[in-house]
Amino acid sequence: MTGTDPPAQRAWLRDLLGALVYPLTSNGRLLTTGVATGVTYVILVLSAFPQFSAQVLTQDLTDLAYAVTALTREVYLGTGWLGIGLVATYALLTGVAVTNAVALVRRAQRAGASTFVGIVPGLLAAGCASCGAGVLGALGFVGAMAALPFEGNLLRIGGIALLVIFLGRAGDPRTCSIDPT
């Protein structure tokens, strides 16, 4: 980036950096991000092949680790390292978004119920952005995923872009101004 960037772009990049760094500011936030990232990764991988996931997990829930490792291998075989990287990036950005959303909800609860109601649509939009290509698989559209160019990687890139835009707009939740009136 050069010094001739418009101020709005610089502000957006500063807000994006603030949003990405926020989970690193305490152990609790880092733990929340890690748990949300792990859960998101598991959900994305399991929903990539929902029939296999259902068969394995209905037999024995303790086979979750086997299902995740087998399906991670399948994602790798289908889309290579790019697919694994996109799923991991997706999960990590979702973990950051969840941590930031929790902070915004806590601030909104202190500010009042009407502010909390105003934040809910934004949280739902972030949630939709984080569902990714896995939702198509969970809804039974595995064939549609296979028909997509690049085995759904473009859809994953689109979801990552939406998450990055959301995080850049939201910024660091500690500096977000919530007006109590």
Image: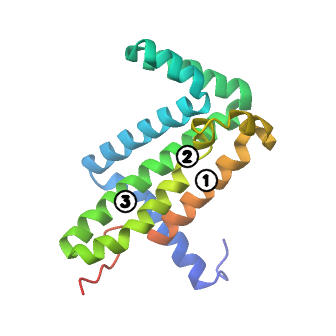
**Cα distance between the residues tagged 2 and 1:** 7 Å
Q: Secondary structure at mark 1?
A: helix
Q: Which residue is found at the position 45% from the left and 58% from the top?
A: 20
Viewer-side residue, 46 vs 177: 46
Contact (CB < 8 A) between labels 2 and 1? Answer: yes
For the residue marked with disc 2, what is the amino acid? Tyr
Q: Secondary structure at mark 2?
A: helix
Nearer the camera: disc 2 or disc 1: 1
Among the 4 quarters of the image, the one containing residue 37? top left
Q: Is residue 174 above or below residue 96?
A: below
Viewport quadrant of the C terminus: bottom left
Q: Is residue 143 above or below residue 17?
A: above
Q: Which mark is residue 17?
A: none
Q: Which residue is found at the position 28% from the left and 83% from the top?
A: 179
Viewer-side residue, 30 vs 140: 140
Q: Secondary structure at mark 3?
A: helix
Q: Earlier in the sequence, mark 2 or mark 3?
A: 2
Residue placed furthest toward the top: 59
Q: Is residue 118 left or right of residue 9?
A: left
Q: Which mark is residue 90?
A: 2
Q: Is residue 180 left or right of residue 80?
A: left
**Cα distance between the residues tagged 2 and 3:** 15 Å
Q: Earlier in the sequence, mark 1 or mark 3?
A: 3
Residue placed furthest toward the front: 140
**Cα distance between the residues tagged 1 and 3:** 17 Å
The residue labelled by disc 3 is 100
Q: How is the image coloured?
A: rainbow
